[in-house]
Image: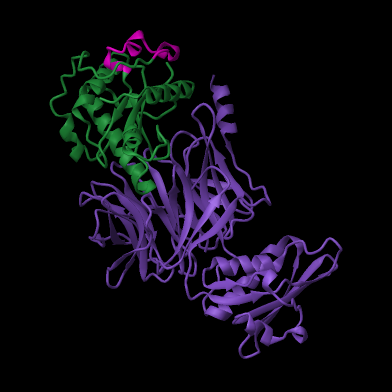
Chain colours: A purple, B green
Amino acid sequence: MHILLRRILLISLVVFYAPTSRSELVIEITKGVETAVPIAIVPFGWQGGAAGMPVNISSVVQADLKRSGLFKTLAERDMFTRPTEVAKVKFRNWKALGQEYLVIGQVNEVEGRYQVQFQVFDVYKGEQLLGYRLTVPAKDLRRAAHHVSDLVYQKLTGKKGVFSTRIAYVTSTALPNNKKNYKLLVADADGFNPKTIASSFEPLMSPSWSPDGKKLAYVSFENKRAAIYIQMLATGKREKIAAYKGINGAPAFSPDGSRLALTLSKDGSPDIYVLNLQNKLLMKVTKSYGIDTEPTWSPDGKTIVYTSDRGGKPQLYSIPSMGGQARRLTFAGDYNARGRFSPDGKSIAMVHANRGDYRIAVMDMATRTINVLTAGRYDESPSFSPNGDMILYAARKGKRGVLSAVSIDGRMQQNLAFDSGEVREPAWSP
Amino acid sequence: MRFNKGVLVFSLSVAILSGCSSTDEKEGSLLDGGGAGQNDASTSGYSDGSSLSGEQFGSNGLGGSSEIGLGPEFSDPLNPLSKQTIYFMYDSSQVQQDFIPVIAAHAQYMMAHPSSHVILEGHADERGSREYNIALGEQRAKSVYRMMKVQGVSDSQLEVVSYGEEKPASDGMDEASWQLNRRVEIVYQGQ
């Protein structure tokens, strides 16, 4: 019986890192900025094999910029001409189409590698704003396209693009006989290239990126008890970091990656601990009789903000990461939980509930003003984009869990719809 | 009292599934260091725990319990042992009066069967944040754990695991479903 059981447990958890090219994610902008800037991205020229460009660079760039909500891209069918070099550009044509910016480019295949070059123009001034060239192998063409998007975005908005980043998320799919298949996936920020990095018939939870983007910490119930693992994305190798009796939850890497904040209930009620990942020393940070969980680090690593119900209802508190006096941060609403520091440390995103509606809100740390960004009833798990402009979160559409993104001013919103299954706990990579 | 057949079937299947799992837990697991938490209020006055009759609610039996080595009393709908799920109010880990006889019956059974081993699985409804719900599920399971302890059940017979909102009994997004999800399942390990 026991040997059989071990075998069952072995099959019940398969960890792998196999690339799949199919997209499972469709992004739909549900609320855009009225002032979106018109931009024409002309299909890039191609010099190479008869099979054509392995990745349609310009259409990836077009989708990226459109998805940011800040740009209105011109449909290809509305373009009078499709220049691929500057000599053929007639700015008055683009002006007539109401375009403010123009992007043209070419892809050249040279001995199995691909040279991607592009130029960005200010249509009104007839001036080149940016010219750039990069050479990549075929497997990196999609990444090259996102890099182009990042460069265009940064040039035109002055802010860092996040098109080359990735997202981690958890899915669950119902199986016959009451079981579920839980998966932890990592995909490009546009939902392409989803890769399953862990799969189990028991729950997987709480993915958290290391600051270098190379590792994920997460919770797995694969042994019918909670344990925290840290997994290398490149190799799929992982290490069991915490498997104490009771809760092993809410892992969060410190900003320098040397420590992991986590929730343990080994001594009674759930408390926040900090584990030094080098010497494995465990330090207890909070000591209350109630629930303390969901730690998030300030970018300077000095403060941990967490959820506590010591006042009766869950609210956010802060405490020095080396331990000390806890301070309550939130007072508005009857439920404020799962805080996440913005990359600049000036605000905190959280789940905020009032009269039974759970929404994503952002609190300004200086003024303590809370701004509710979403209108769902069951919104949860906010995660900042690395440039701080957007918040990715989990929402519900009917019975299904879906992912949504909202800009931090609340003006822009998009849904990320998957083919099937329930999606949740998005975590945006650094 | 609402006792949904689906839930009972579900908790039974959990029991069967875990019926073949190993029991290599350490001794003395899950002693709550704090002792007198706020939830202890509900345990007062039940330390005698002598009655197995209790009050009855619902008539759904757990047909087939004998398959996992539990006695016929687990299949008798008139016996509180046939109830293996304790339900809770929203954001609360306080055991409601109706369920105290159920917990008492299981405590008595475990004391009479010292080799029995139970996992108290704590669960929460889907609202709110997931890790907070893990903590809430654990508090619920610990409320049941403390009541069983007060009745005299040995630490080594009990273990608490919280699944938070990760394993809902019902997938609906309404109060009827949430009621079924805010629960502790008393899962007997293989005997």
- Residue at (44, 15) in percent of width and height: B68
- Count all numbered tags in the image, as a single digit: 0
Foreground residue among A274 and A171:
A171
Q: Is residue A171 above or below residue B56?
A: below
- Residue at (68, 52) in percent of width and height: A21
Residue A357, image x and y in percent? 31, 51
Horizontal relation, residue A9 to residue B24: left or right:
right
Question: Can residue A209 be seen at all in this image of the molecule?
Answer: no
Horizontal relation, residue A117 to residue B119: left or right:
right
- Residue at (72, 86) in percent of width and height: A90
Q: Which residues are magenta?
A: B63-82
Residue A74, image x and y in percent? 63, 72
Residue A257, image x and y in percent? 48, 61
The answer to which image quadrant residue A215 occupies is bottom right
Residue A207, image x and y in percent? 48, 51
Q: List the single residue furthest toward the left.
A: B45
Q: Is residue A134 above or below residue A279?
A: below
Quadrant placement of the N terminus of chain B: top left
Q: Is residue A302 above or below residue A131?
A: above
Q: Is residue A143 above or below residue A152?
A: above
Residue B172 lies in magenta, yes or no? no
The answer to which image quadrant residue A129 occupies is bottom right
